[in-house]
Image: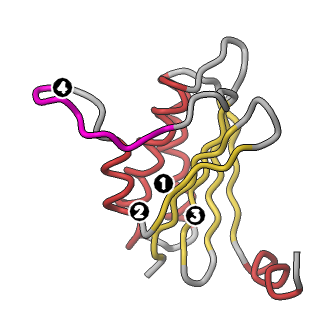
C-alpha cells in the first residue's frame, strides 16, 4: 500500500457486517447499510446503494451459501466513491451477467448492479472466498 492509498483509506468511512447466509441476513445487510449511509449524511446515494447491497447480498445467500458459513458486507465511502463489497465462501461460483430468459422472475440482479455502478467485479481471495464489489459515485 502506497502513501496515497494509505491516506485515502485513513479518511474513508468503513462499515462492515458479518451476517448469516440466509434471506433474513440479506435483508439485514440492506437495512443496516442504508441506516449507516443516512447517519453519514449520504441520503443522496441511499437508493442506489440500497439496491446494489440488496442484489449482491441476495446473490451471496442464493448462490454463495455454504451451510454454517456467514457472508460479509462492507461499505467504504471515500471522497469520490461508495464501494460495496459482499464476500461469501463459494469462490468456485463466479457471477456472470447473462440475459435472463423471457418471463424469468430472476436473473437480472447483476444487470441492475451494472446499471447503477460505475464498475463492478469479482476478487478471489483466500480460498474458498470471493468478493463481489461495485463502485458507485458518491456525488
Q: Nearer the viewer, mark 2 or mark 4?
A: 4
Sequence-wise, the earlier of marks 3 and 4 is 3
* Magenta span contains residue 96: yes
* Magenta span contains residue 4: no
Q: Nearer the viewer, mark 3 or mark 1?
A: 3
Q: Which residue is mark 4?
A: 104
Q: Which residue is mark 3?
A: 83
Q: Nearer the viewer, mark 3 or mark 4?
A: 4
Name above or below for residue 14 compared with residue 72.
below
- Quadrant of the rendering where the C terminus is positioned: bottom left
Q: Which residue is mark 1?
A: 34
Task: Give the camera-side residue of 120 and 70.
Answer: 120
Q: Which residues are magenta?
A: 95-104
Q: Secondary structure at mark 4?
A: loop
Q: Secondary structure at mark 3?
A: strand
Sequence-wise, the earlier of marks 3 and 1 is 1
Q: Nearer the viewer, mark 1 or mark 4?
A: 4
Sequence-wise, the earlier of marks 2 and 4 is 2
Quarter residue 129 falls in? top right
Amino acid at each position: 500500500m502506497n502513501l496515497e492509498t494509505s491516506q485515502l483509506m485513513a479518511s474513508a468511512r468503513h462499515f462492515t457486517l458479518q451476517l448469516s447466509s440466509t434471506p433474513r441476513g440479506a435483508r439485514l445487510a440492506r437495512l443496516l447499510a442504508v441506516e449507516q449511509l443516512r447517519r453519514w449524511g449520504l441520503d443522496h446515494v441511499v437508493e442506489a446503494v440500497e439496491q446494489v447491497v440488496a442484489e449482491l447480498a441476495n446473490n451471496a445467500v442464493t448462490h454463495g451459501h455454504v451451510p454454517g458459513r456467514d457472508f460479509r458486507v462492507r461499505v467504504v465511502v471515500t471522497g469520490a466513491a461508495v464501494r460495496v463489497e459482499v464476500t461469501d465462501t463459494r469462490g468456485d461460483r463466479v457471477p456472470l451477467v447473462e440475459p435472463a430468459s423471457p418471463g424469468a422472475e430472476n436473473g437480472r440482479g447483476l444487470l441492475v448492479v451494472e446499471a447503477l455502478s460505475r464498475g463492478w467485479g469479482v476478487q478471489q481471495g483466500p480460498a474458498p472466498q470471493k468478493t463481489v464489489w461495485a463502485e458507485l459515485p458518491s456525488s
